[in-house]
Image (cartoon, grey):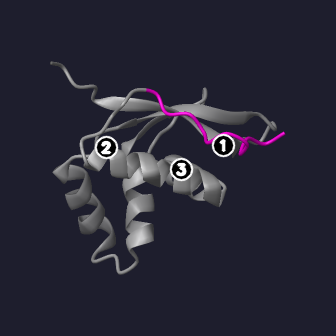
Amino acid sequence: MNRPRSIEFELPFGFEDEEGNIHRQGRLRIPTQKDLTVVLKIYGDVQNPAYLETLMLVRILESLGNIELDADNRQQIVESLPLPDIEYLNSIYQKLLSGHSAGPASAPTGSKRE
């Protein structure tokens, strides 16, 4: 059985770019030991577990809307997301760590921006 190497998601609120476009759909890949090693090598011993998870999200975010992600903008975009979006991505990250990837993930009902 082939397991997916990434998971699609839809953020509750999304990232608003400079033109006012909201980007909510994206993809996270399964984290690797190398991701953790690189984060710890660059940032040292991160004392705040929540910030470590945010840094890991920066590493494993493959796509968000039609934004061209690169090393220069990826961290700024993740750190600019509303906290409910970060919490939502962290829940997906935890599922990926535990080996659960039940297909596309949608935002919790009632949490979308109107």
Marker disc for residue 82: none
Image coordinates of residue 17 in percent, x first then y, are 72, 41
Q: Around disc 3, counting alpha carbons within 10 Å, would you say few (fewer than 14), some (14 to 19), or many (20 or more)?
A: some
Q: Residue at x 27, y 29 (%)?
A: 5
Q: Which residue is mark 1?
A: 12
Q: Is residue 59 visible?
A: no
Q: Is residue 25 left or right of residue 32?
A: right
Residue 108 is one of the magenta-drawn residues: yes
Mark 3 or mark 1, which is nearer the start of the sequence?
1
**Magenta stretch, main secondary structure class:** loop
Q: Which residue is mark 2?
A: 96
Q: Amino acid at mark 3?
A: Tyr
* 53 w.r.t. 113: above or below: below
Stretch in magenta:
104-114
Image coordinates of residue 1 in percent, x first then y, are 15, 18
Q: Residue at x 46, y 27 (%)?
A: 104
Mark 2 or mark 1, which is nearer the start of the sequence?
1
Mark 1 and mark 3 residues within 8 Å of each other at the beta carbon: yes
Image coordinates of residue 40 in percent, x first then y, are 26, 67
Q: Is residue 83 left or right of residue 39?
A: right
Q: Which residue is mark 3?
A: 88
Q: Is residue 61 visible?
A: yes
Which secondary structure lies at badge 1? strand
Q: Amino acid at mark 1?
A: Pro
Image coordinates of residue 111 in percent, x first then y, are 71, 45
Which secondary structure lies at badge 3? helix
Res. 76 image quadrant: bottom right
Residue 81 is one of the magenta-drawn residues: no
